[in-house]
Amino acid sequence: MSFVTSRTDAWISYVSLVLVSFVLSAFYLQTFFYLISILLLSLPVFSYNLTRYAFNRLKPGLANDPPVCIKGGQSHLILTVSNPTYFPVSSVEITLATESLFYGGGEPVIHSLQLKPGSGNTLSFPVRYDKYGIYTSSITGITVYDYLHLFSFSKPLSAEASVTIMPDTPPREKRMELIYEEGFDEFTDNDRRGSVSSNVTDIREYQPGDRLSRIHWKLTEKLDKLIVKDNEATSSNEFTVLLELYQPDRETCERTFIASGGKDDSLYHVLDRAIEEAWSVSMELLNAGEAFRFIYYNAGNQDFTEQLIHSADDLNDVMTRAFYAGSYDTADLALTIYERAGLNKGTLIHVK
C-alpha cells in the first residue's frame, strides 16, 4: 500500500508542478516559462521509455555461497542484477521467498535497490539455518519504477538457488551394543537374527580396516593384543537404518507450544532430531566397518528409496536425496508400510 501512496504523491507533485508552470506561462507570457512547461510535459515520456528499455534487459540471478554447510553455519545468499544498458535504474523492488520441503516457506521479503549500468549490482545476505534440509530461495517477482516514480513495470521470475544443510555430528556417545557383540563362546558367533556372520574359520592379529565387530575380546585380553575372527559371511543378516521423515504439521506444533505456556517446542524439532540420530548411528556403523542399508519413505512417490552404504560419501548422497523427498505428518508411517510390505530382513534400526 505504501508504494501506491508513493506513486500517488509523485503524480500529485508532478501535476501540481505542471499547473504552476502553465499559470506562470499564461501570466508572464515569457519564453522561459513556455520552455519549462514543454520540458515538464516531455519528462514522463523520456522517463517511461528509458526505464522500460532498461527493465526489459535486466537479468537477475541468485546463488548460495557455500551451497552446502552444516547446521548453524553461515551461507551467503547472493543476489545479482545485470543491467547491460547505459542507463541507471533508480528504484527496483525484488521479492525473495525461501522454502524447505520439510518445513514449508516463510513470508516473502521485498528488497529495494538502485541499479547502476553494468553487471556489478550485487547484494549478499548472510543467512544461518537452524534445521537440516534443503532450502530453496527464489526471485518470485521484480518491479521497476521510473525516474519520476510515475510508472512501474513488473514481471514474474523463476531464478532459484539452493543450500543444503547437512549433519556433522559424531557417532553417539552411548554406543549401539549390537554392532559389537562377540557371540556365545570363544570361537563361534551366534547365528541369531542380526548377526554379521556365523561360524569362525580362523583367528589372527588385527589389521587396519578390520571391523570392530570381529575383534575377539576374550583372546585380546589374554594375549594383550588385538585378535580378530575370520567368519563365514552370511547373505541374509544385515543392518538396515530406516529414517522416518516425520514432522508434525504447524498447527499441531503450535497447539502444543501454546498449551505448554511457550515452554515445550519439541514438536518443531522432531524431524531434525531424527536426521541427526540417523547420521550418528550411520557413522557408528561405518566406523565399525559395517556396510548397511539406508532407507527412507518418499510419501510423494509412495515408495521407499534404498541405498547400500559403504562410505561417508554414500551416506552424504542418500541423506541429500532424502531431503528432496519432503516430510509427512503421520507418525511411524515408514515403519508401518515397511513391515506391512514384508521388507523385514536383518537388524532394523528404526530412527524417528
Image (cartoon, rainbow, N blue to C red):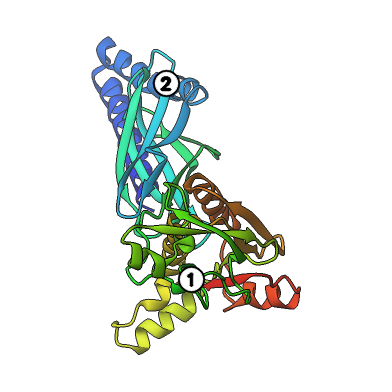
Left or right of residue 309, residue 89 in this image: left
Q: In the image, what residue type sits under mark 1? A: Glu
Percent x, y of residue 226: 37, 57
**Which residue, given by chain and number where applicable, does mark 1 sit on?**
182
The quadrant where residue 177 appears: bottom left
Instruction: Return the mark for residue 83.
Output: 2
Report crowding for label 2: few under 14, some 14 to 19, many 20 or more residues within 10 A (C-alpha): many
Identify which residue, 259 or 84, lies in the foreground: 259
- Residue 55 position (above or below residue 241): above
Number of residue marks? 2
Q: Earlier in the sequence, mark 2 or mark 1?
A: 2
Q: In the image, what residue type sits under mark 2? A: Asn
Identify which residue, 241 or 134, lies in the foreground: 241
Query: What residue sits 25% from the left and 12% below the top?
Result: 32
Camera-side mark, 2 or 1: 1
Query: What residue sits 55% from the left and 73% below the top?
Result: 350
Name the residue at the top extreme.
31
What distance separates the C-alpha of mark 2 from that of mark 1? 68 Å
Percent x, y of residue 325: 60, 57
Query: What residue sits 47% from the left and 48% below the top?
Result: 312
Say if residue 149 shows up in the picture. no
